[in-house]
Image (tube, rainbow, N blue to C red):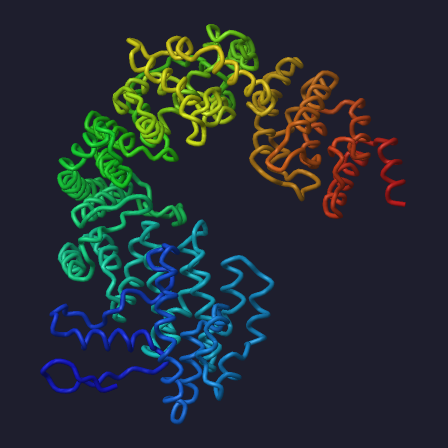
């Protein structure tokens, strides 16, 4: 292309026609050279999903539509001398291989339509049977280096779509699988396949950066930037990567290079819900790197996807000290950048203004807390965690909960021995600890079984026997920003939100690490909405009792369980009580197992076995397993030492109760795994129950699929063969006939 722009002579732009976006980026760059931007290409991205945010898909669609009037004419111009390039251009820009081309096919000239819209059947068949990320990569790997550019483009487009979905999978494993093909495509240096590969490098580099895989992210970010993408956030991501490895000079160059690209007036995204300016972005990046260095100094890889190896070289004290020194400097600079702003944001929150978009400030103080703790400054770390908690409360994101409370409580307990005291409530981790003796377990069982954890008091004055006040106050604190806003709309004068949250913390901290409180809170999810009509859809008069309750809490001298319950009112208490009574069987199934085995007189070794075995049953699906795996058998084996005449009926009653409790999709069919404990807590009377299972009497009237029926029969056959059960064996033989 020859471009006439400005006072200088014509500029020649050379690019393969199928790399349309890079061609356009060069055109825009030279046309705007007088602006002095110093960039080689004015192109913000080469993927529909930049920076992991699919919300920018509309922008990419707009770019496609803008190209439509020209792309057909460019293809026709190429067709005479470069027919293959013309076909590639259209297949690439219209995303033919990605399935988005139907609405855009009007741009295809009639003479090229057949080749452009032709399906690559063999490759499509390879991708159809699999839905996993690794499956897509493996299915197409043999075609990644095909001599046919259309096949390479097909594979590249599918790899790009697969990279978009990279979320919970191991990012380093994914990179290892895609790396050979991606490196080969990038070496092509031009054309549609290269352009697509640059977009993949952009996405992969940023996703690895977000995963704190700095060493792996930097080369891909560099590949995207070197190809001409003018992405300010890509440069800032590489800035963090270079800071992490200690190359401060190169990092500073990236930070400076990013400044002229984006518009500071529009603000910068600092993650979901958070926005700020360049100063905020710098503070966030410094804190993130400081946190990663602090983790590394503590022996933890900041990238959770990196496999742990036994042969890893031990870090010397000199190396550790050096990492912490760098981390302290970066964390200190980060806090200095936002400290004054954070104080202002807290003041705005107290005045009733929304500061949700400033929630990132809490992370910056939490990062310095981690570094201070690693450096031995426990008091400084505790101060920073408390500040982070206060800022998170000011931001008021309900889904975050109390992010920093666990660290605060951990540091407050540091150095305080509990003298081997029995936990105040049922604690399976404590009970199952390998160092626990049978005597300790017996004493704990006596204490826990005396607690009325399944009894909901009739009167709220006796409500302190279970942590209902905790569940209610926690819901109010978590949703405080929205609730206070609702009160303001109703014209209600409420107490200072942040002060009330601060006063509630001792009560919440007292119960936060207790299993009974956690389980109760999960059953009474959003307890304030159960106790009161406080939703925006309710009438103002219906919400009034809730705000009366809030004001009573604000006026109270003491913020404890008794005061919360006395302010609650009988009607609100009754609603909470009825809701909980209807869901007692969902409260804590593992605690039900504990109570059943203890009351059956099982020895403590068998009680521990029942807990360990059922915990694994509850945690894992295992729906297709007819018989248990050896690791689980090892957990359940001690059940054989219990009195089966007492324990088996107790476990059968648990199974019946479990089958009567609706799950997410209602009442369920009996899974085979529920029967496994009965094999080890065996008693001959159990055969009658197994016959019920065979007859489908525990399936809540639901029929089994062929796979479920096969699994059920295999499980019951295992019982019949191993336990020599004549009646069950005969019934199974009759079924097979």
Q: Which residue lies furthest to the left in this view?
A: 7
- Left or right, 444 with reference to 45: right
Q: Which of 362 and 646 is in front in this view?
A: 362
Q: Is residue 573 above or below residue 12?
A: above
- Residue visible at 81% across and 36% down? 721
- Residue visible at 22% across and 46% down? 276
Quarter holding residue 720: top right
Q: Position of residue 443 (x, y in %)?
A: 52, 10
Q: Where is residue 3 in the image (x, y as percent from the top left)?
A: 20, 84
Q: Is residue 445 above or below residue 302?
A: above
- Residue visible at 35% across and 80% down? 70
Quadrant assignment for the C terminus? top right
Q: Where is residue 716 in the image (x, y as percent from the top left)?
A: 77, 36
Q: Nearer the viewer, residue 50 or 649?
A: 50
Residue 309 appears in the rendering: no
Q: Nearer the viewer, residue 380 or 103?
A: 103
Q: In this view, does 381 lie above or below 334?
A: above
Q: In this view, does 205 lie above or below 157?
A: above
Q: Position of residue 648 (x, y in %)?
A: 72, 21
- Left or right, 463 with reference to 416: right
């Amino acid at each position: 292309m020859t471009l006439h722009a400005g006072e200088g002579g014509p500029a020649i732009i050379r690019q393969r026609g199928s790399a349309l976006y890079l061609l356009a980026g060069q055109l825009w760059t030279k046309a705007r050279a007088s602006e002095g931007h110093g960039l080689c290409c004015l192109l913000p991205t080469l993927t529909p999903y930049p920076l992991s945010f699919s919300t920018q898909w509309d922008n990419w669609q707009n770019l496609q539509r803008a190209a439509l009037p020209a792309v057909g004419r460019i293809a026709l111009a190429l067709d005479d001398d470069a027919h293959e390039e013309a076909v590639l251009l259209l297949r690439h820009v219209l995303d033919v291989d990605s399935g988005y081309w139907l609405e855009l096919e009007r741009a295809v000239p009639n003479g090229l339509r057949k080749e452009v819209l032709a399906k690559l059947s063999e490759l499509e068949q390879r991708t159809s049977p699999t839905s996993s990320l690794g499956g897509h990569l493996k299915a197409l790997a043999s075609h990644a280096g095909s001599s046919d550019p259309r096949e390479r483009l097909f594979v590249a487009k599918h790899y790009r779509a697969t990279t978009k979905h990279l979320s919970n999978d191991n990012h380093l494993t994914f990179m290892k699988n895609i790396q050979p093909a991606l490196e080969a495509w990038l070496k092509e240096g031009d054309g549609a396949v290269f352009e697509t590969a640059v977009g993949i490098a952009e996405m992969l580099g940023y996703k690895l950066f977000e995963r704190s895989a700095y060493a792996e992210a930097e080369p891909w970010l560099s590949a995207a930037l070197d190809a001409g993408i003018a992405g300010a956030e890509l440069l800032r991501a590489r800035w963090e990567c270079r800071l992490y490895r200690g190359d401060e000079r190169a990092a500073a160059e990236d930070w400076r290079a990013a400044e002229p690209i984006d518009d500071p007036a529009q603000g910068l995204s600092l993650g979901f819900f958070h926005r700020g300016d360049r100063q905020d972005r710098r503070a966030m990046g410094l804190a993130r790197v400081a946190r990663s260095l602090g983790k590394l100094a503590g022996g933890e890889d900041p990238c959770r996807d990196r496999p742990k190896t036994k042969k890893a070289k031990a870090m010397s004290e000199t190396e550790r000290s050096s990492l912490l020194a760098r981390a302290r400097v970066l964390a200190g600079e980060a806090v200095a950048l936002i400290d004054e702003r954070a104080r202002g944001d807290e003041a705005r929150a107290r005045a009733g203004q929304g500061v949700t978009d400033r929630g990132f400030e809490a992370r910056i103080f939490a990062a310095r807390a981690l570094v201070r703790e690693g450096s031995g400054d426990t008091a400084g770390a505790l101060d920073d965690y408390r500040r982070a908690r206060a800022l998170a409360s000011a931001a008021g994101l309900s889904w975050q909960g109390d992010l920093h409370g666990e660290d605060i409580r951990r540091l407050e307990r540091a150095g305080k021995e509990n003298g081997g005291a029995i936990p105040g409530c049922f604690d399976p981790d404590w009970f199952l600890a390998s160092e626990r003796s049978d005597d300790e377990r017996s004493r704990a069982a006596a204490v826990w079984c005396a607690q009325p954890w399944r009894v909901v008091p009739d009167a709220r004055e006796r409500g302190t026997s279970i942590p209902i006040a905790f569940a209610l106050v926690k819901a109010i604190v978590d949703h405080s920003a929205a609730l206070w806003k609702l009160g303001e709309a109703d014209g209600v004068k409420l107490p200072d939100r942040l002060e009330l949250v601060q006063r509630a913390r001792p009560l919440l901290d007292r119960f936060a690490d207790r299993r009974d409180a956690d389980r109760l809170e999960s059953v009474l999810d959003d307890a304030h909405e159960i106790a009161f009509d406080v939703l925006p859809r309710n009438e103002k008069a219906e919400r009034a009792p809730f705000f009366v309750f809030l004001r009573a809490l604000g006026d109270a001298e003491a913020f404890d369980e008794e005061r919360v319950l006395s302010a609650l009112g009988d009607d609100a208490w009754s609603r909470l009580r009825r809701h909980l009574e209807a869901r007692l069987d969902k409260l804590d199934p593992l605690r039900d197992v504990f109570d059943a085995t203890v009351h059956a007189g099982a020895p403590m070794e068998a009680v521990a076995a029942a807990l360990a075995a059922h915990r694994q049953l509850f945690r894992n699906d295992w729906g297709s397993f007819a018989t248990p795996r050896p690791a689980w058998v090892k957990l359940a084996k001690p059940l054989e030492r219990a009195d089966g005449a007492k324990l088996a009926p107790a476990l059968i009653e648990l199974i019946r109760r479990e089958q009567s409790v609706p799950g997410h999709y209602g009442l369920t069919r009996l899974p085979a795994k529920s029967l496994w404990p009965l094999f080890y807590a065996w008693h001959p009377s159990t055969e009658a129950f197994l016959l019920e299972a065979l007859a489908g009497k525990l399936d809540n009237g639901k029929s089994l699929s062929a796979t479920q029926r096969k699994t059920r029969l295999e499980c019951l056959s295992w019982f019949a063969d191993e336990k020599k059960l004549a009646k069950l064996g005969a019934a199974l033989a009759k079924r097979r006939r």
